[in-house]
Image (tube, coloured by chain):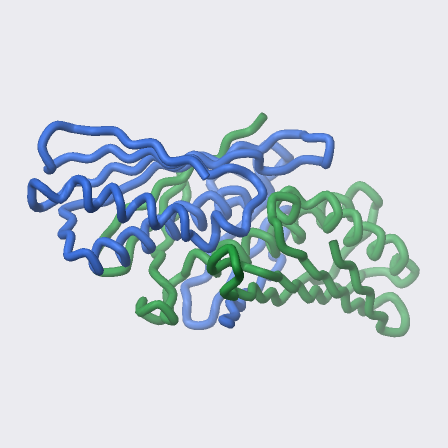
Chain colours: A green, B blue
Amino acid sequence: MWTYETSVVWKEKQRGETHGSGKPPVEVAMSPELGGPPNIWTPADLLTSAVASSIMTSTLFFAEKSGIELRSYMSNASGVMEKTSGGRTITRIAVEIAITLSEAGQGPAIRKAVERAERTCPISNALRCPVEVVLHLSGAGPVKKTEVTT
Amino acid sequence: MWTYETSVVWKEKQRGETHGSGKPPVEVAMSPELGGPPNIWTPADLLTSAVASSIMTSTLFFAEKSGIELRSYMSNASGVMEKTSGGRTITRIAVEIAITLSEAGQGPAIRKAVERAERTCPISNALRCPVEVVLHLSGAGPVKKTEVTT
């Protein structure tokens, strides 16, 4: 069992700061859609980044275990908030990953690593909503697109 | 329907950076428990802060609507990760809030605002696991503790 501890301190109006021991503080605020200021991390942004960064770190973990060398990894993620019968909530998170491999021939292995990362992602597992992952691969021969939804 | 867009870029080893349009980038990494470096935001930290900051911004929203003036608001949150039959996941998030009121007599109203914030929190609503909220109040007469679990 592992515990992750953070704190939040209110600064002014709809803004505050979140802290984690030894980590640089991050300014947080209410969403602009709800009257908050622009250009500040919102709770929904943090959730979206939690999912996307967890899938990245898990992919790196499984890739290393399988001896796959990556040249680059980046992803764009979007979290959708909607009003439902149970109130306002995040109903879907889509993560679109672009990976460039260092060596051709490792396409099937990296696809397996991403699928495994998504399936075992502890953050996705904690969510009620679907997390949709699309993988764009280059450096492994012709570009291929893989879709994984859990 | 609102969409929250962020991206993640891998830097080296188990580290990357998450970006949101117009927002300062945040370094992210695999948890030290899984072999990642210390003192960098992890996906589980981000999830824990997403919940805690959402409860804060919702509380501020409802407090303002009810004409409650706060002198201070801070919270400590902890997210617990465990192995379950469905894999590793976050099984519980506890948020302990300390609020100081500017005016005595607003204790019942702020308690109602915190309860409403927790009940309608779009991030808590997106989670499978319980979110437990404890409120410590001062500036409203004798210190009282309220527990809310959803």
Q: Quadrant of residue A19?
A: top left
Image position of B65 (left or right of A46): left
Image position of B72 (left or right of A114): left
Residue at image coords 49%, 65%: A83
Residue at image coords 15%, 35%: B138
Residue at image coords 67%, 30%: B83
Where does the N terminus of chain A fall, quadrant-wise?
A: top right
In this view, the residue in front, B131 or A24, is B131
Total count of labels: 0
A110 is higher (above) or lower (below) than B38? below
Image position of A150 (left or right of B147): right
Residue B28 in the image: state x and y as whole percent: 53, 50
- Residue found at the far front of this picture: A85
B144 is higher (above) or lower (below) than A47? above
Residue A117 in the image: state x and y as whole percent: 74, 48
In this view, the residue in front, B55 or B80, is B55
Residue B139 in the image: state x and y as whole percent: 10, 37
Residue B142 in the image: state x and y as whole percent: 12, 28
